Image (cartoon, helix red, strand yellow):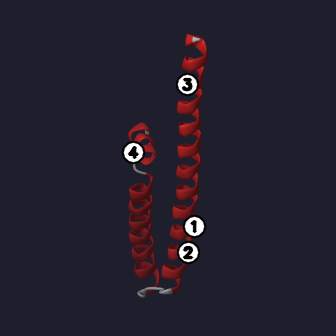
């Protein structure tokens, strides 16, 4: 579990696609075994959910970059004022 957690932190986009593929394969297999058919409507639901997750990750990464830049700026200013 810890390895997966580290992987999702370092590769958030890839982890979404891995989870989507595995979950889709499980769902399609179950649907085929139970009803001997595939439901195409599930594709649209999956697509909407994946797009939503990608937007959340994009927003989170953008927020983290801003806070990281602010942290670097804070350290630079701290060093400048401590040296004076």
Q: Could you tell me if the residues under marks 1 and 2 are in contact, i.e. CB atoms within 8 Å?
A: yes
The alpha-carbon separation of the residues under discs 4 and 2 comes to 23 Å
Q: Nearer the viewer, mark 3 or mark 1?
A: 3
Q: Which residue is mark 3?
A: 75
Quadrant containing the N terminus is: top left
Of labels 3 and 2, earlier in sequence is 2
The alpha-carbon separation of the residues under discs 3 and 1 comes to 35 Å
Provide the secondary structure element on which disc 3 rests.
Answer: helix
Of labels 3 and 1, earlier in sequence is 1
Q: Residue at x 51, y 63 (%)?
A: 54
Q: Which residue is mark 2?
A: 48
| Mark carried by residue 7 | 4
Quadrant containing the C terminus is: top right
Q: Nearer the viewer, residue 14 or 75?
A: 75
Q: Can you give x and y, in whole percent of width and height, for residue 43 in the image?
A: 48, 80
Q: Which residue is mark 1?
A: 52
| Mark carried by residue 14 | none
């Amino acid at each position: 579990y810890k390895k997966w957690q580290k992987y999702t932190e370092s590769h958030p986009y890839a982890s979404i696609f891995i989870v989507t593929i595995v979950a889709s394969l499980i769902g399609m297999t179950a649907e085929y075994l139970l009803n001997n058919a595939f439901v195409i409507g599930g594709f649209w639901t999956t697509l909407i959910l994946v797009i939503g997750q990608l937007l959340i990750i994009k927003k989170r990464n953008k927020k983290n970059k801003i806070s990281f830049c602010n942290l670097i700026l804070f350290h630079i200013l701290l060093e400048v004022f401590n040296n004076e």
